[in-house]
């Protein structure tokens, strides 16, 4: 019996570069063009939320910009009618509840930011999975998604909105 040939080195076929910069008018912490066999197949950009710009606020800003550029998305999920902060608190463990109460009291001074904090909590409890997709006539796509990292303190996941532009022709 002969041994199977070794699998090709993926670095010969898949290559990703990483940059930082403004994408769609918002500072991105990670811009990654991706190449397969020397041909670019996609570009991804992700964004880091902060106290004044929660993840869902960035998601909505990006969705508005992409809609202005490409028209209405083919698919877009929306959160349920905003549920109250108190309703969300009933769904999380007590230690998380205490932490969230402290967090919310800080942002409650700005009702608009507070609204997005509640939406971020809806993402955390999985009552909303943010997603929007635009499909061009040539089959290429733009996807706006919400990435979630590993759970940190209090079991909450860091949320990062991301936009992915993908070419279709390279995959055919």
Image (cartoon, helix red, strand yellow):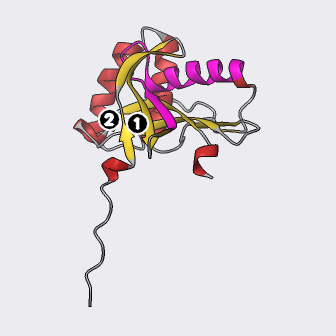
Instruction: Please give the residue where the numbered disc 2 appears in the rendered image.
Output: 97
- In the displayed orientation, state which residue is furthest to the left: 153
Position of residue 52 measured from the top left corner of the image (x, y, whole percent)? 41, 12
Instruction: Report the label total.
Output: 2
In this view, the residue in front, 113 or 26, is 26
Q: Which residue lies furthest to the top in this view?
A: 109
From which residue to which does the magenta span run? 40-69
SS at mark 1 in the image: helix
Q: Is residue 11 left or right of residue 126?
A: left
Q: What residue is drawn where x is 33% and y is 40%? A: 149
**Distance from label 2 to label 1 (Cα)?**
6 Å
Placement of 111 over or under 37, stated as above or below = above
Q: Where is residue 155 in the image (x, y as percent from the top left)?
A: 28, 42
The kind of secondary structure element at disc 2 is helix
The answer to whether residue 89 is visible is yes
Residue 151 is inside the magenta segment: no
Task: Count neighbours of disc 1 (C-alpha within 10 A) and say few if under 14, some if 14 to 19, many if 20 or more.
Answer: some
Q: Is residue 48 visible?
A: no
Quadrant location of the N terminus?
bottom left
Magenta stretch: includes residue 49:
yes
What residue is rendered at 51% in x and 37% in y? Answer: 42
For mark 1, what is the residue? 89
Relative placement, left or right, of 6 versus 83 is: left
- Residue at image x 75%, y 29%? 72
Asked which quadrant contains residue 133, the reply is top right
State if disc 1 and disc 2 touch (CB < 8 Å): yes
First in residue order: circle 2 vs circle 1: 1
> Taking 80 as reference, is 40 left or right?
left
């Amino acid at each position: 019996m002969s041994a199977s040939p070794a699998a090709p080195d993926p670095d010969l076929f898949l290559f990703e570069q990483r940059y930082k910069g403004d994408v769609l008018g918002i500072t991105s912490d990670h811009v990654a063009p991706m190449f397969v066999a020397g041909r670019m197949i996609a570009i991804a950009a992700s964004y880091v939320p902060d106290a004044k710009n929660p993840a869902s606020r960035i998601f909505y800003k990006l969705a508005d910009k992409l809609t202005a550029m490409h028209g209405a998305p083919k698919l877009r999920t929306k959160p349920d009618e905003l549920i109250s902060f108190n309703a969300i608190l009933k769904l999380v463990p007590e230690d998380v509840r205490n932490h969230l109460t402290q967090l919310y009291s800080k942002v409650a001074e700005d009702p608009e930011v507070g609204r997005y904090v509640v939406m971020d909590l809806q993402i955390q409890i999985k009552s909303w999975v943010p997603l929007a997709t635009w499909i061009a006539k040539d089959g290429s796509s733009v996807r706006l998604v919400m990435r979630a990292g590993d759970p940190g303190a209090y079991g909450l996941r860091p949320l990062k909105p991301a936009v992915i532009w993908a070419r279709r022709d390279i995959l055919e």
